[in-house]
Amino acid sequence: MGDDTWKDLFPGAFSKAFFFSSFNVRDLHTVDNGILEHLYPTMDSGEWDVLIAHFLGVDHCGHKHGPHHPEMAKKLSQMDQVIQGLVDRLENDTLLVVAGDHGMTMNGDHGGDSELEVSAALFLYSPTALFPSTPPEEPEVIPQVSLVPTLALLLGLPIPFGNIGEVIAELFSAGKDSQPHLSALAQASALHLNAQQVSRFLHTYSAATQDLQVKELHQLQNLFSKASADYQWLLQNSQGAEAALQTVIAELQQFLRGARAICIESWARFSLVRMAGGAALLAAACFLCLLASQWATSPSFHFRPLLLIPGAWGLGGAILYAGLLATTGLKLDPVVLGTMAATSSLLPFLWKAWAGWGSKRPIATLLPIPGPVLLLLLIRLAAFFSDSFVVAEARATPFLLGSLILLLVAQLHWEGQLLPPKLLTIPRLGSSSPTGPPRHSGAYALKLGVGLLLCTRLAGLFHRCPEETPACHSSPWLSPLASMVGGRAKNLWYGACVGALVTLLVAVRLWLGRYGNLKSPEPPVLFVRWGLPVMALGTAAYWALASGADEAPPRLRALVAGASVVLPRAVVALAASGLMLLLWRPVTVLVKAGASAPRTRIVLTPFLGPPTSQADLDYVVPQIYRHMQEEFRGRLERTKSQGPLTVAAYQLGSIYSAAMVTALTFLAFPLLLLHAERISLVFLLLFLQSFLLLHLLAAGIPITTPGPFTVPWQAVSAWALMATQTFYSTGHQPVFPAIHWHAAFVGFPEGHGSSTWLPALLVGANTFASHLLFSVGCPLLLLWPFLCESQGPRKRRQPPGSEAEARVRPEEEVEEPLMEMRLRDAPHHFNAALLQLGLKYLFVLGVQILACTLAASILRRHLMVWKVFAPKFIFEAIGFIVSSVGLLLGIALVMRVDGAVSSWFRKLVLAQQR
């Protein structure tokens, strides 16, 4: 009765079964009430031999509310009544076993190996006496014992064949009035039955496989034969053999514990060849990412065969390997097949690296990472080899991030990069390229650094303590509002969460409005105006329902349940619709038609026809942009001369970053729904911290055109560290007990039925939300310095025809900055910069997963490998996959915008010619 997991583990094993869905951890009563409906009638009927009732209310209540919530007191009182009712109905030949399958942490979770999680209660009761009525004066600790064989013998059942546990022999002692000899003989009998079962298992298992060590197995079999022979002799000569009984008990216990040890050692085996091969592949991929990031800036680098040639080599290597196996008759191993394909795909890169290894490629170019950044990166990678540092990574990462921020501020001061570089623009006819005033000051960069450090410190307030540090106390702000008891405090926190949501929405709209990206009539802009507020309203309403669902009046519970399903799904649907609209129409430009004024200088080089080459288009696009800016500043009227028809447009200078910020906002709302309400404050800090970091990095990235655009390693490393810091600030840990399983029920409070991929997707999105957001937003590191070009004072242009305009000489006028349109002056450099940025980010993430792989491989026999190193490797690997996909999506969005802008300009040029 109860948990339907028994149905999957033992199909058809029960004469009667009443199973109920167990996956919905937010449901406290369905399973328990279903059991109580059938439990007592079944007991009274007597038509049963073994009756199992698996209650789940206490377990689910711990996950949902924690151990100290009033709902937990109600469930425990209900269990007390159930046990009392069972005791009243027990017959004399019936044994009642009340056992917990695990314990519970102070947060209500389980799954780890902490003392609170592995300590579970065991209560045995029978109307007739089973054990001595007086316990021993000094109870001893019995190591390596198992409940499974003990319960089997107590119930008169055979011990399960695959069990390798040791029976609790002390429970089989005779009563207090019996002789010590009989008590020892009862213990020996229980241990002998247990040892017989384990011996049969070892014999059958060793005959089927070759996993067990032959020498050790032979020694164990000899030990069991001797102990079994001594036991049989004692049964025939039981008088005066107390010392011999203790020897037999010790021999049987030694056999059982030795069998357990040999099985554990054999089952925890590792393939050193595959481990070394995988680590070598990872290292080669990281090295080639570093090489390719250097090659990307070379004019001879070709983008089109970047994936085609390695893909062809990889396919050829896989086919060759499969052919060799087919001719030799060997078994095809998918892992080795994938390894051969991956190795073959690396060969063209290795050949190119070998060919250019000489004087053309000095070894200094292979290590372009600055020394301080390389030192911080090495410290972080070395920390993965220490279980203490892996456990304390939530504190080590902010320290490294703060150190990098201070290093950036100091470097800006030392190198004098707080002053802007010369903005190289294409001059208008008769004018020179002006040099603008200082864009930033040392105080400005210092304020950004202080703000970043403050945000890092505030994000650290949202922390979850690992179970290895019992003195630590997790932040109570990570728990959902439904777990709070006080009504006033809950309302205040709800107001703060809604305030964070509104602040995030207003900040995004103000930023888009500052650069004019909210004035376009395009569908994505209209969706930002009206769709985002609706998404924020739906999120706030869902939070209100989720935090007070248990307090809703009975007549409104059906309405609340329906709204809890509709609201999150509606928010996700709106976010998906916004992303689709953004991909469909990424160019959000407000265009106004008019005629050029006679005073406007001709900036568009005339063509006899449409541009015939990409070079023609690349040359004319910046001129068109300047021309549109000048027309927008002037009067959009047809003059008496009836000059050529022109257009005025703005928000082109931020067209790439506007699309990125909009897409990140659309992604943030569904991810925010999957977290507890108070995590919205962390998301607000995330956006603010990213904004400050981008401005600080933009202050030190020189903008030189024409020429290659390079994002420094400091920026990429800081971005990756922020992703890791946000992972911990949102209450996650790289261990399985810390997974937020409640995310699977957002929008699906009744569960998912038999589906597993959808809840896995929801839980994965909750766990790796920071990896996804930062990887998608990685191209902002390239775009933001150009966006910040608009900062600083500029001379106000005078209206055409005014006296002030006549007094201003052309060479004294300050042109409007091109901002992100400067990237279109050199499309090849733009593509190379995107590729280089992606490779650098992949390199930083790749060396992290490489370090985790090496740590798990080298420390495979470490005491904490399954507790620390292996889970860290798994989480880092999945995070790398999510980050890689997110990085591809972010770069693809920028390329989609770039293609749409090119198409838009091409149409504009044709219109100009007509």
Image: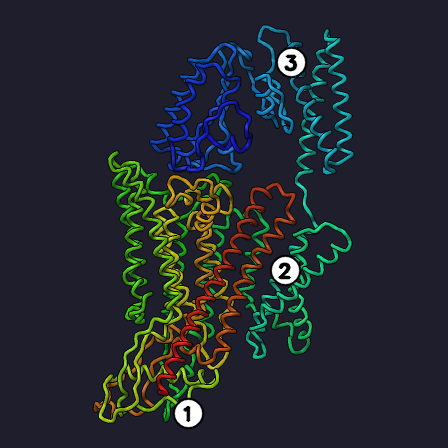
Instruction: Identify the residue under disc 1.
Output: 608
Q: Position of residue 244 (x, y in %)?
A: 73, 14
**Viewer-proximal residue, 90 or 30?**
30
In which quadrant will I find the C terminus?
bottom left
Residue shown at 51%/16% (left/top)? 95
Q: Amino acid at mark 3?
A: Ala
Q: Earlier in the sequence, mark 2 or mark 3?
A: 3
**Viewer-proximal residue, 215 or 728?**
215
Q: Quadrant of residue 257?
A: top right
Q: Position of residue 653 (x, y in %)?
A: 36, 75
Instruction: Identify the residue under disc 3.
Output: 186
Residue shown at 52%/22% (left/top)? 15
Q: Amino acid at mark 1?
A: Leu
Residue shown at 55%/32% (left/top)? 9
Q: Position of residue 797 (x, y in %)?
A: 27, 84
Q: Is residue 210 left or right of residue 836?
A: right
Evaluate whether residue 698 shows in this view. no
Q: Is residue 214 left or right of residue 833?
A: right
Q: Position of residue 19 (x, y in %)?
A: 46, 29
Evaluate whether residue 670 shows in this view. yes
